[in-house]
Amino acid sequence: MSEGIKIKIGLEIHVQITSLRTKLFCPCSSDYRGKPPNSNVCPVCLGLPGALPVVNKEAVREALKVALALNSRISNMLVFTRKHYFYPDLPKNYQISQYDGVGSLPIAKGGYIKIEDDSLSKVVRIRRINIEEDPGRITYPTGSMVTSPYTLIDYNRSGIALLEIVTEPDLESPREARIFIDKLTSILEHLGVTNPELEGAVRVDANISIEGGERVEIKNIGSPKEVEKALQYEIARQTAIVKSGGKVARETRHWDKNRGVTISSRAKELEEDYRYFPDPDLPPIPITNELIDEVRRSLPELPNERIKRFMSEYKLSRYLAHVIVIRSKVLADAFESAVRKCGNADTIASILVNELLRWVDECHFTIEEGLARLTAERLCKLVQYLKERKLSSKLVKEYVRRVVIEDIDPDELITKGYVSIMDFGYLSNIVDEVFRENPKAVEDAKKNPKAINYLVGQVMKKTKGKADPQITYELIVRRLRENAS
Ligand SMILES: [Zn+2]
């Protein structure tokens, strides 16, 4: 799509610090989801006159964890800045944030994340990390800003602690952007800072420019997959403008995921439009080396170390280790607890990666929901039956599908007679049938051993996948030999 055109993408990722019990500057609960609108508020997060913010020290510790994990330089002062703009989700008309400029500074600057894939290995630089407050939540009754006759605002989310993590424009494709976000969220999940499965916990603004055009910002994209789609759309749109001799305007656009398009929302503000100045309600607080050292000592095992350990301790392939750890900490934890229970790391890893993830994605379950059904106990039963050859590997796949979708125990499927057929006599009859019905395939198989698989497949089809593949294969080979002589 974008062959030969140079693309620059930078990301601003807003991550809610979901590990906190209260909001960033007030004692309101951080657990705002599912509450009646505007019930989780107080004078501070509603921005009423005279209300005074008090910084949540735990939020600062969480931000320091992230800064250390991303190899960033931590500032020696914590300074909060007012960022002014008028929007209905912001009751004070300014957001308490941080700013990299005169009289102010972000909690950390610099740093990097290394991203990897089969064909990719690159270092993406971090520009800065800010702590700031989340605005309220805007709902459009028809789902679209353009078609809704009115807008609803809920301030329950107003004042939730956010980290804003800004990258340099080092990313060069939508795919790289998605891989970066997956890696970052995996790090944050391992740090215990955020639960990325919560709705709205990770939101992304993406800046994108193509050669010869201005920078366009796409606001508020909800998930890594959506980021990839929005960027693909933008590249196609901008490329078409440049190719037809037009000029891409510098602007802010909005991703409409229902329609799969970006829509122009406003001309981009310049930094000076925000009238940044240090918040007089929040005097600067020193960030001491003692505090930084203490936080450093509390850092848990991070994804890169964990992938390496999975490869050495459990002898997993790089691919399996990478998918398990980066896809979700919850998945990696489930893998380890199943292996502790019944060993067979490789089998468990492939069931999780190839089967569980497939059905979780297909059914739009969270990984937690999938794992609540495919528990360590059930996983271990499947591994055991596979070893005993009670179940073929093909049947195990079918079992995982039914366990995840129907929440059924493997033993219940077994008592329903859902097991591998290992009965020689029975299978022998089916092989006879298949030979009669497929004379041409039989002739092929005599000359070319690879064609035997087709015949095995036919037996599988007749037995709905229940035939033991090893026995079936042996029976077919024997029958071919008899036929030849
Ligand atoms: Zn409040």
Image (spheres, rainbow, N blue to C red):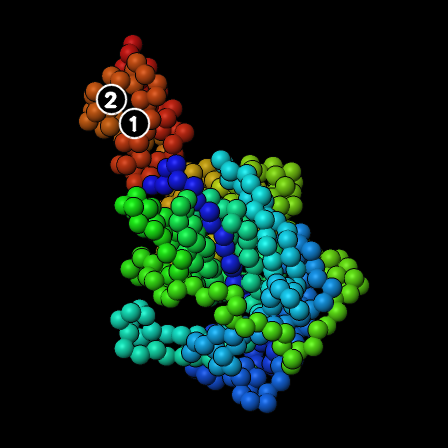
The image's mark for residue 209 is none
Q: Is residue 462 above or below residue 194?
A: above
For label 1, the residue is: 454
Q: Circle 2 — which element?
A: helix
- Nearest the eye: 179 or 349: 179
Q: Residue at x 29, y 46 (%)?
A: 245
Asked if residue 352 can be seen in this view, the reply is: no
Q: Amino acid at mark 1?
A: Tyr
Name the spot of residue 229 as percent of width and height, x first: 37, 52
Q: Which residue is mark 2?
A: 441
Q: Nearer the viewer, residue 339 or 436?
A: 339
Asked whether the residues under the numbered discs 2 and 1 touch, taking CB atoms below 8 Å apart as contact, a structural biologist would say yes
* Residue 56 appears in the rendering: yes
- Left or right: residue 68 versus residue 426 is right
> Viewer-proximal residue, 261 or 435?
261
Tag 1 secondary structure:
helix
User: In the displayed structure, would residue 65 be above or below residue 282?
Assistant: above
Q: Quadrant of the N terminus?
A: top left
Q: CA distance from mark 2 to mark 1?
A: 8 Å
Residue type at mark 2: give it: Ala
Lower sequence index among marks 2 and 1: 2
* Residue at the spot 32% in from the left edge and 70% down from the top edge: 145
Residue 367 to residue 78: above or below = above
Residue density around tag 2, few if under 14, some if 14–19, many if 20 or more, within 10 Å = some
- Identity of the residue furthest to the right in this view: 290
Closer-to-camera residue (270/113):
270
